[in-house]
Every structure is written in structure tokens, then in C-alpha cells.
Image (cartoon, grey):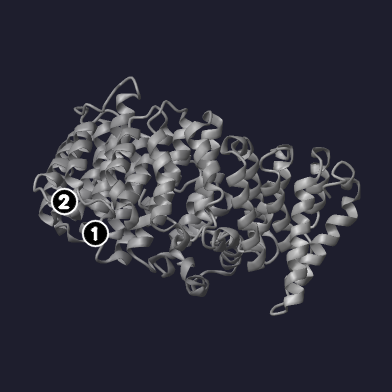
Amino acid sequence: SAATSDTIYMHFNTIIPTLIAEVASVSKVDDNNEEKEREEATRRCSRAVCHNVDTAGVNLLISEVASKCTSDKESVRKEACWFLQIVIEERATRADFYEQVPIIIRELLQRLNDSSQDVLKSTNLALTALSKFVPAEELVAHIGFIRNLIASMVSDARYRKGGVGDGEFLLPGLNQPKGLEPLLPIYQRGILYGDSTVRETSAAGLGELIKITSNKYLAGPFLIKLTGPLLRIVGDRNPSAVKIAIVQTLGLILTKGGPALRAFVPQFQTTFVKALSDPSRMVRIEAIKALALLMPLSTRVDPLIKELVASSLGKSSNVSVETAGLVAIQTATLEALAVVLRHGGKKVKLPESIPSSLEAGKELVVHEDDGIRESAAKVIGYACELLGANEANEVIQEFVVDKMPTLSSSSSEVKHGIACICRRVLTTSIGEEIDSKIYDSISSIIQILMKDDKSMVREAAFVAIGAVLGCSDDAKSSLSRLEKSIAKGMDSKEEIEVQKAVAKGLCITATKQPGLFRTQEGLFLTNNALKLAMSGAQRVQFSYNDFLWLALDVGNGESGLDEYLNLAHFDQAKTMKAIYSKVLVKIKSVDDSD
């Protein structure tokens, strides 16, 4: 090969397949010295060919090796991956194969889903050589290609015949010792030094890799390697798309990492709180979600609550009207405060933390902005749950019951705030402990608000009536009394958002009163919901699909459907069977806490 370096590549179509086949056949033989010597000689010969071939022949060399990577023989695929490894190693100093790097990447990444452990190990070694001998700045140019290849491979594994569908899928090549390590330098380079497009692709792509890697192979020091670069650049002046990708990926790392990331909690917390005042709504939403994930690791919740309370009231040094509108910041901060109270409220050590949160909620639940009122009501609900029934009764008395004499003359903002408070307090576990007289007053007030001429008030009231029903100690008789009033909100002439609000309220009832809508008393509303799930506007259909999923307890099998079918008339039973098999069984879960 040394003597014929400028012509040997013309014969690669016979030489390379022969070398791969030879090394594949002898590598399977154990404890035979003669065969071992033959294998070593073949491997030396293969390396010599890769080392000596003229630059003009490198593309033919790689093309011929790549064609063997998809062989139906496991041993051939394994050795073809090894051959790509030695091409990289032997040509490293000359660096004359960079134009063929996409071909190498394509073949090696596709082998990450191979069924053979030997092929997976060989692939990992080849990828390791690629990341070692090709500079990261060269490889990062292919980050979009890498991400698309992996997405296509995962999609194929999910949705081909016999695939896992929407269930958990773990990519075999990443779920082995050091499986993710060869790819990490490429993503790190993109995150730290790429332009905004590369940063977004790298951060989002890293998150996608984390999703398909088992926690076992993301342990300890490796997670810290992933976390550092993301935390380092999240505060830079990045476009919102980059920040969203980074915060989402940090959230995934938190989900996978758990206690191993406890040392990073302060940095995570600072990052997410700062993101609450970002101009982009999606960045703020992702930051709120990430704070919820952080709570199991956080041990010092009181300073965080204090900061969020100050920000929600517009008194924090972090609040800057230039970065986002004050209303948007207040809403996001209240949402974050509610999340912290819900997931970390039991960790508070200072006696004033929860009461200060409640006071902030009470102050802002009468705000002129409906989004702030809704978020403030969430804070009130979770604060009352933590402070107990007495505090909850006092809040309801002050903000709901005492307003009854002047309800008709109250502004729509006040009425909306009342409905939001009722919904949020009754939805929590403290709802069942509300004083019976106060509960009756709530029920009466919400029924009045359900007839209000403002759709915003009706929406909030129809959701709240679901929580009222959910807390009833005699749900069947309450349902019989309220069903016609609730059904008015399901009328096709009613505004779409009100129809959706009824569905949301019924979801709360179905969660708090399991089985209620599979009884004779619940049949009327279940059938009305079925009608809207089949014929309403698409957004309405989705809302009632969620309700039916909860009402029939689809997550626990077909027994809920059978209970309904035993009560329903033939036409309704037939329709329910159809929507059950085509739609409901495909829903993974429904969260009514939003």
C-alpha cells in the first residue's frame, strides 16, 4: 500500500470488502494462536492501507467502508465501524477526510440503535476517535445534521411497526458506559461558542439526548459536565429561542439528575428567577416549570419566597419594566410563587414566609388585570392549604361571603376575583374542611356568577362550580340540583371559552369525586360532554375529551367505560365506544391543576 498509494484506491471496491470480511471472520475465533496472528496481520494491513492511501482516494475509502456499516451480518457491521475508527486515527495528522465527516457521522449515529452489543461498543470507540481527532469547532458545523439524524432515528424506532409509540424509548448506543461521552464535546462547543442558531440547536439537541438516556448513565460527574456550560451562558444576551432551549434542557437535567445536582441549586435558582422577568412569555413559562422541578432539591425555600413576594408586588430590585411589562412579570412571579408553595411550601422554616405569600395574593387578587387575579388566587389557595382550615375560612369570609350583599353592584374584576379564589381554595386538600355555612354561601354566590353578563366572570364561575361540587359531602344530590345550571354553559350558543371552562370545572369534580359521572345522577352531564366532544369546535372537543378521560377513569382500564355503558342508551353507548377507542385511549394523562 505504501508503494502504490496513488493507485491502490482504484481497487478499493475489492480490497476493502475483503479486509472487512477477513477481520470479521477471524475475530470470532477464540483460543487459536494461528487465527489470532492472522487477525492481527489483517488489522495491521488495514491500518497500513488507511495510512498510506493518497488523499485523492480517501473519499473512495470512506465510501466503501460506509457501505458495509448496514450489512445484515453483525460481525461485518462491527468491523466496518472499527474500520471507520482507524481511518480517523490514521488520517488524523493529515486531516484530509473532513469533507467526508458527514458520511462518517451518519453511519456511526445510525448504528447507535443496533441490536448487537458488539456493534454498539465498536460504534462508541469510533465516535470517541472522531471527537478526539477532529476538532470540536469542525464537528459543531454538523450539529444540525446530527440532531436531525437522531430525531429521525428515534421517530423511526417509535412509530415503525412494533415500535414503542409514545412510551419511553432509550437509544441503545447511549445506554452503555460512556455512551454519551463522545458526543458531549460537540454539544458543549456549540453551547459555549456557537452563534444563536447553533446555541439553540445544541441546547435543544442535548435535551433530546438526555431524554433517550437512562438515569443510570447520567450519574454524578457526567451531569455536572452537562450543567456547567448551560448555566454559564444562559445569562448572556441570547435570543428567546436559545433561552427557551437552555431552560428546558436544564429542567430535563434536574429531572434526571436529582440529588447529584444539589450543589448547583443556588445557580439554578438564580437562573430561573431571573428568567421570570424575560420579555419572552415562553421563557417565563419554562422558568416556572423548572422552579417546580427544583423544589425537591432546594433546602432554603424562605429566601426564594421572600424574593418572589417582593417581585410580585413590584418591589424587587430584579423587576425591570424595560425587560418585560410589569404586569407580565407580576403574573409570572405569582405563578412561580404558587409553584414554590405547592412543591416546596412544607420546607419553610420562617413563620412569616407563608403569611407574607398569602398577603401578596390578597393584595393582588383585586388587581385590574385578569391574569394577575388568577395567579394571585393560586397563591391564596396554596397558602391557605399550608396555613390550615381556620385561615382558609377567614379568607373566604373576607373575600367572598362578606361581598355577597354588594355582589350585584360589584365590578366584574371583583366578581372574577371571587370566583378564582373559590376555585383555588376548594381545589386544594383544605377544600373539604371549609365550614359548612361558608361552603353553602360559596355555592350560592358561584351560581349567581354563572349567570353574569360578562363572559370572563362566567368562565371563572363555571370552573369554580366544579370545585364546589368536588367538595360536596353529598355530591349526587348537589349534582342533581346544579346540573341544569351547568348544562347552560355547555350550550353551543355559549362562547367557546365558557364551554371550555365548564369542561375544566367538570375535570376538577371528576378528580375530587371519582366515579360520580358513572352514576345515574352523573349521566346527564356526561352525555352532554360526549355531544360536545364529538361536535363542538376543536378546542372545545379537546377540553371535553380530557373530562371524559377522567370521568371514565381511562388510565385504569375499561371498567369505567363498562360502568357508563351499563347506564347509557344504545346510541350514546355506541358513540362513547367510538370516541373511547379512537381518542380517549390515546390520551396519556390529564392535569386539571392548571
Q: Residue at x 73, y 79 (%)?
A: 32
Q: Residue furthest front?
A: 3
Q: Is residue 334 left or right of residue 250?
A: left
Q: Amino acid at mark 1?
A: Ser
Q: Residue sitting at 18 percent across and 43 percent down?
A: 400
Q: Is residue 206 visible?
A: yes
Residue 170 at x, y percent in the picture? 55, 61
Q: Is 572 situated left or right of 369 in this image?
A: right
- Give SS at disc 2: loop
In the displayed structure, would residue 307 be above or below residue 504?
above
Q: Nearer the viewer, residue 419 or 17?
A: 17
Secondary structure of the residue carrying tag 1 is helix
Name the one closer to the observer, 573 or 23. 23
> What x and y, as percent, mark residue 109?
65, 52
Total numbered badges shown on the rendered structure = 2
Task: Report the amino acid beneath label 2.
Answer: Val
Residue 464 in the image, given as x and y percentages of width and height:
31, 49
Cα distance between the residues tagged 1 and 2: 19 Å
Q: Nearer the viewer, residue 320 or 413?
A: 320
Q: Nearer the viewer, mark 1 or mark 2?
A: 2
Task: For label 1, count other residues whose C-alpha is less than 10 Å away and answer few (under 14), some (14-19) or many (20+).
Answer: some
In the rendered image, which quarter is residue 173 located in?
bottom right
Is residue 495 visible from the viewing direction of this image? Answer: no
Q: Is residue 405 above or below residue 464?
A: above
**Mark drawn on residue 4:** none
> In the picture provided, is 37 more to the left or to the right than 314?
right
User: To which residue does mark 2 refer?
Assistant: 348
Instruction: Give residue 522's position: percent from left, percent from top.
Output: 41, 64
Task: Find disc 1 in the rendering and name its residue.
Answer: 429
Q: Nearer the viewer, residue 347 or 267?
A: 267
